[in-house]
Amino acid sequence: LLGVDGGAAPGLRHRAMVLAWLVLDQPRWTEFDAHYLPDPAHPVARLSEPRNYRESADDPAGVTVLCAEIPCWEGDATWTAGPDAIGATVAAALAGEGLPPVRPVAVELAHLPRVYPLYPPGFERSLAATEAAVARAGAGRVVTLGRQGLFAPDNTHHVMAMGRAAAAGLRPDGSLDAARWSAARADFHGHVVED
């Protein structure tokens, strides 16, 4: 949930993420679409090779791209590092895992300030207060949904289902059927992150 100024709502915090796309001058790095590296000491949480998710004639021959998801804090050394440093960090980390060598010919970065919700004791009170403030300010015409809106690490298909549920809750006059939306929100708590 975001505050009026676009910052995080009071009492709710997120870890940030740097996405690093490493261009490799080779047709494929591995046959797997994703690698999960759950060690808290490892800089990369997940590494994906997008071409392995699809069969596409549009992919250039002899080139593949890896997408490294690197958790961090906004403003820390990872957040402020440049493409070369991030590329070297990813390559060294993967080598340390015994994975095939990574020699990027280019690295592109994106910085996402609010990705992973943090759940310290008492966060529920902050979340409830923020949701109540949004409900009051929106006067029944604003809903919160998705990863940021529900403070939950949902998958894309979950967020799309939420959007469909929100649209289904609209009456012909544009008002929201509060009971229907409340029931849909209750269902959202049953979402399980998949990968």
Image (cartoon, rainbow, N blue to C red):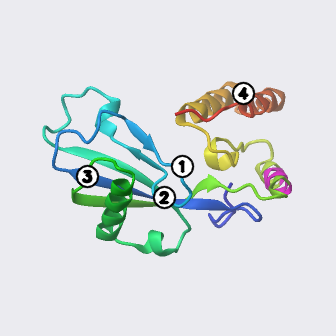
Nearest the eye: 171 or 132: 132
* Secondary element type, mark 3: loop
Nearest the eye: 122 or 183: 122
Residue pointed to by mark 4: 169
Q: Nearer the viewer, mark 4 or mark 2?
A: 2
**Labels 1 & 2 near each other (Cβ < 8 A):** yes
Q: Amino acid at mark 3?
A: Pro
Could you tell me how far apart the alpha carbons at marks 3 and 4 are, in whole angstroms?
51 Å
- Image height of 67 relative to 182, above or below: below
Residue pointed to by mark 2: 42
Q: Amino acid at mark 1?
A: Pro
Q: Nearer the viewer, mark 3 or mark 4?
A: 3
The mark that comes first in sequence, 3 or 4, is 3
Image coordinates for residue 155, horizontal then vertical, percent: 56, 37
* Secondary element type, mark 4: loop
Residue 128 painted magenta: yes
Could you tell me how far apart the alpha carbons at marks 1 and 4 are, in whole angstroms?
39 Å
**Labels 1 & 4 near each other (Cβ < 8 A):** no
Residue 166 painted magenta: no
**Labels 1 & 3 near each other (Cβ < 8 A):** no
Magenta span: 125-132
Q: Amino acid at mark 2?
A: His
Residue pointed to by mark 3: 101
Residue pointed to by mark 1: 38
The mark that comes first in sequence, 1 or 4, is 1
Q: Which quarter of the rendered picture does the N terminus lie within?
A: bottom right
Q: Tell me the residue at 39%/52% (across/down).
A: 97
